Amino acid sequence: MKEAAGIFIYNKATENILLLRAYKHWGMPKGHLEENEKPRQAAERETFEETGINVLQLKKEKYIPLGEVNYVNGKKKIFGYLLVINQDKNPKVTLSPEHQQYKWFSLEEAEEKINKNQFPFIQKIQELI
């Protein structure tokens, strides 16, 4: 089973969460773990590669592991993290070529847009926020 990891960035001040769109699927910035890489390291690296946001430089209010979710087809396991920030403006995103769009959504909008495989993460975030 392939393993991937990603980070949901939630801005408490604007009440928005960042999602990226690849083809018709919306989800968190994420990607596969490289050899000997821990899930959190992969999540931070992939978030930077896909958004230009260096999560290590953001002032964090909370940084919470959300656990893991197995994709419905059983071919992939994803480790999720929630990074809560509190700043007047959402961080600037520099979108990678592998994505077509990004948007800062309300949690309610994110729940409607999110890829069904990542839906359990949104449910958990709603409980935590």
Image: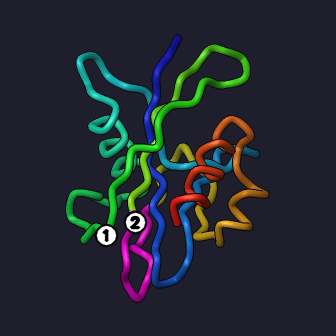
Q: Residue at x 62, y 14 (%)?
A: 75
Which residue is situated farthest in the front direction here? 127
> Residue 46 placed where, x, y %?
38, 42
> Residue 38 placed where, x, y %?
27, 28
Q: Is residue 46 above or below residue 15?
A: above
Answer yes or no: do the residues labelled 1 and 2 have beta carbons within 8 Å? Answer: yes
State left or right for residue 58 relative to residue 71: left
Q: Amino acid at mark 2?
A: Val
Which quarter of the figure has residue 39? top left
Which element is circle 1 on? strand
Residue 125 is one of the magenta-drawn residues: no
Q: Main secondary structure of the magenta part?
A: loop
Q: CA distance from mark 1 to mark 2?
A: 5 Å
- Please tell me which residue lies in front, 7 or 23: 7
State left or right for residue 100 relative to residue 78: right
Q: Which residue is mark 1?
A: 61
Q: Which residue is mark 2?
A: 84
Q: Which of the two labelled residues, at mark 1 and mark 2, occupies the earlier sequence position?
A: 1
State left or right for residue 6 relative to residue 107: left
Which quarter of the figure has residue 118? top right
Q: Residue at x 70, y 50 (%)?
A: 114
Q: Which residues are magenta?
A: 84-94
Q: Amino acid at mark 1?
A: Glu
> Residue 124 placed where, x, y %?
58, 50
